[in-house]
Image (tube, rainbow, N blue to C red):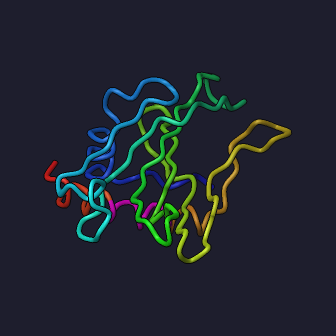
Amino acid sequence: MTPTPLNKTATAIFLTLTEGLNSAGDHKVFDAHAYTWNWDGGTMATHVEHIGHIRVTSGNNDPLPIFSIAHYYKQNGDMMRDPDMTFIEIWGKVYPASFEMSGLGKYEESLFQDPETKRLRMHPKQQRDHASFANTWMKNIKEQQNL
């Protein structure tokens, strides 16, 4: 089975969010409502980070960038993900790879690298669900952050 990429609208928003993040550790915050300065409710800031690359044995073996996009809130002094998703950019398409919600104790990997073969593997239903959620979430981020 082939993984489900973000749709065109969500991909355009994703590319806006990740623009200029070329190396692992590069990051930025979109905070149109000053949430991170107060942590007292309202529209959460969007945190975007280039978290590294993977190489897979299929395709042309170029390194594939991995990005994290997250909303955070504080609970009892701890930073909670609401949600945090990772994405892999593969030859012009963007694929959700994981989903985490701290408050629910939920972590799901839907697209991952097999440690032995170095090929990408997936959990098809989860990956489709993650893509569907991310398509809606990207539109919400665009509206919330006035992109």
- Outermost residue on the right side: it is 116
Q: Nearer the viewer, residue 57 or 29?
A: 29
Taking the magenta stretch, the answer to whether it contains residue 134 is yes
Residue 139 lies left or right of residue 50; in this view the side is: left
Q: Quadrant of residue 115?
A: top right
Q: Residue at x 72, y 30 (%)?
A: 57
Q: Residue at x 26, y 47 (%)?
A: 30
Image spot of residue 21 (x, y percent)? 39, 29
Compared with 103, 113 (above or below) is above
Q: Main secondary structure of the magenta part?
A: helix
Image spot of residue 74 (x, y percent)? 43, 66
Compared with 12, 45 (above or below) is below
Q: Nearer the viewer, residue 52 or 37?
A: 37
Compared with 87, 72 (above or below) is below
Compared with 21, 89 (above or below) is below
- Outermost residue on the left side: it is 146
Q: Quadrant of residue 45?
A: bottom left
Image spot of residue 41 (x, y percent)? 28, 71
Q: Residue at x 20, y 55 (%)?
A: 34
Q: Quadrant of the N terminus?
A: bottom right
Taking the magenta stretch, the answer to whether it contains residue 136 is yes
Q: Range of the magenta residues?
A: 130-137
